[in-house]
Image (spheres, coloured by chain):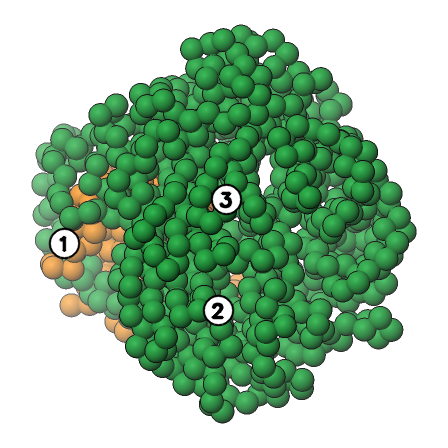
Amino acid sequence: MDQLENRLDSQTGGRGKHKEELRLVRKAKAGDTKSFSALYAQIYIELYKFALYTLRHPQDAEDAVSEAVTAAYENITKLKSETSFRNWMFTILANQCRKRFIKREKDEELTEDIAQPEIDYGQKADVRAALETLSEEERLIVSFSVFGGYKSAEIGGMLGIEAATVRSKKNRALGKMRKILE
Amino acid sequence: MDREVDERKDKQTEQQEGSVIERIAENAENIEVPESLRPEAVERRLEKSRRERLHRRRKKWRTVCSAAAACVCVLIGIASAQNGWFTGKNRGKLSIGIDTEYAAAQSSPGKIVSAKDYDEVYAYIKEERKAQEEQLNERAESVSKSTNESAVESASDLAGQPYAGQGEQPAANSGYSDTNVREAAVGEGDIVKTDGKNLYILEGQNVQIVSIEGEKMVQTASIRMDKEKTAYELYVEGNSLLIAYSVSGYADGAVLSDEAYVNSDTYNTEYREYTAIDIYDVSIPSAPKLLDTFSQSGSFYTMRVSDGYVYLLSNFYADIAAGREEIEAYIPKIRGENIESSKILLPQYKRGTQYTVLSAFAIAEPSGKTDSIAVFGSVGTCYVSRENIYICEGYYNAQEETVTQTCIRKIGYQDGVLEAKGQTKIDGTLNDSFSIDEYEGNLRLVTTVSPVGNSVAPLARSGETAAAESGFKESNSLYVLDENLEIIGEIHDLAREEQIYSARFIGKTGYFVTYRQTDPLFSVDLSDPSKPQIIGELKIPGFSEYLHPFGEGKLLGIGMDVDETGTVTNGVKLSMFDISDAADVKEVQKYVLEDMYSTDVAYNYKAALISEELNLIGFTAYGQRQTFYMFSYDNEKGFTMRFSRELLGYGEARGIYSDSRFYLVAGNTVEVYTLDTFDKIDDIVL
């Protein structure tokens, strides 16, 4: 569980870190690209992994993060609470992923089997197989827990769904995966 | 369900899930993030798109949501007490005294007023806070759909603008290239420097020294910067190597009290952000020795070197939430000491949140005498002539004026001594520092004048409509100010609905490019400063984003080629203009790099290597990949591509020459080529 704790710790951040982020957000809001980039640098690996595991396609993940980052940059003044850059970023990225789900569905209607995932991102076969069993929304929720370190209530808040719904979906998803992994 | 139950359930589930979650996390451990998502690549992309957006928006109403709305409430008091203060007829004139409590700042025309004490500074901070709070409330009420993009830009295009200038190559004769600078004879730092014997390369956290005296390059030393330091520029003079960097973090890593943590409005005085210059003795290049450090508050902005003195500029952001007693939160420090209030120059309006902190010190004696000035207000474009430093900030006040303005403060410098000389305000905003130029004591400027909304919180979209309805569009102005910053000559209403893309003043003539569908290159005769005259207007497709004098009677333009309809970009364009007759400028040659969409030069003149003497024009362009190009020019044959090299990654690259060799520095690699044939000789990975 060490890893999880580390993730949770990095999420809440040391106090110094919190204050520093606040400072950076202020500067980013004033239009400072470097500050924005510094904020992004703290979380970009998590963001990419999140997108990759949610979308299962490296190019899609790259595009999603890229678009999320542009949207965030252009709308940084809208960021309400100066303390939640990370949550805000994850929310934007989750929405980008959802947009892609919808687009894929449409594409699939046109051509079958277009969304064959590229499997070149170094997953072990069993983990990959386990992920394959999940629905897109389930993967989104699992990614939120794994790479964002968020709890069900937080995920619900970010996705605009009930915490209880998140919890049950997450349980279901993890249950499915456990069967394959154990 | 109550929160506690929720959390307990979460905990239970997490325990069960632990193993699955861990397995996924482990599995993801070694995933490599694509190059294009790395922070440095993202930063560059954002910066670039910001610039491009600025350009694309030329026709658009430039709503300055945040700035305009925020200014409104604060400034009414001053403005209304002062009828006609900034009215049409006085527009651009110096500030005239007003009898309000804070009139001091405007009490004598053109004179800069410094703060009496910190209380006076704090009063401005309080006004800023009030204004921002009101702005927040207004914004909360306004439609959330409205994009705030323009607000971000309005602040950032000023903060992030390249400081531009007269880019001759002062070192052209000495056998090696120096950074392409704004003003000849005023040195500037950059990420790669050479003294003809060594290359000094700033690469991530390392400063690498590479000897180029022998047949093969040899890395002689590497200075590793501490993790908390972000290095920005290097400068080399004699045996001294200067490294400019910023540090942010806590002085002693102290833990905040719970109260301070919870209440994010409380400024933690232990937090610091400062800019410093380390001075190394590199007389033995293999053993650089740290001699001294100079530091001041704020993040690094730029530096200049003149006559052995360094002029360091940083941007310090005051915390407007600070209490009166928390002096460190809103007063900048120089070498660890609060700057005296008498050295703080108050803005021409009553609010403030940022400072441009400026200090001078001798390279030979950084701990010796120093002089500093903190220019309070907001931060913006800075232009340094051979004698003066001009700090310019965009000013938007919908209540008082219908157009965007620029506040200018002039600070004289000589031998490390700074002197506040005057201030003024003119209509319009500067494109970059090439739009402002000092010549024979006069200051010439070209600005783009855009309407500002007169609603309290203009939204981007409604703003556009309002602009269309009022019929008032953008236009451009040219000003000539005398040494007291009084307007002595002006032209208005140039190129309606277009914006300035680039400018260059060469002696008694000025050139500037505006753009909508075609690229009018205007020539202005400034030989009589009181009667500037547009004498030429050349229309060609596309636009130049950077102009550089290229020998007698020639002007080089680097920009974009656009088709006749003005909608499709064909690629990066090089233009050579014949300016031997300024009244009849011709584009005599052009070259289009197809499928390239941008250049570094468009927003950072330092990225160019241009030597008229050696007939070299080098720069990096972007298409699918980043490529460094080198061209030469001939009146008959036009531009010839001498060299091109695709670069890996997204880091900035520089081309420099020394003796008969050309060095291409990109990231941690240096490649050497012959300067005449561009054959590869050697390379080194640092």
Residue B368 tag number: none
Q: Position of residue B218 (x, y in %)?
A: 41, 85
Residue pictured at 55% horizontal, 50% vertical: B162
Residue B628, can we see it?
no
Q: Nearer the viewer, mark 1 or mark 3?
A: 3
User: Do the residues under discs 2 and 1 have CB atoms within 8 angstroms?
Assistant: no
Labels 1 and 3 positioned on one and the same chain: no
Q: In which quarter of the image is the N terminus of chain B?
A: top left
Q: Where is residue B196 in the image (x, y as percent from the top left)?
A: 51, 77
The residue that label 2 is drawn on is B193
Please name the amino acid that badge 2 sits on.
Answer: Lys
Element type at mark 1 = helix
From the viewer's perspective, is residue B436 above or below residue B632?
A: above
Residue B219, can we see it?
yes
Residue in the foreground of this view, choosing between B417 and B585: B417
Name the chain under label 1. A
Q: Disc 2 versus disc 3: distance between alpha carbons?
A: 25 Å
Colour applied to chain A:
orange
Please name the amino acid that badge 3 sits on.
Answer: Tyr
The residue that label 3 is drawn on is B413
Left or right, B584 with reference to B170: right
Q: Disc 1 versus disc 3: distance between alpha carbons?
A: 55 Å
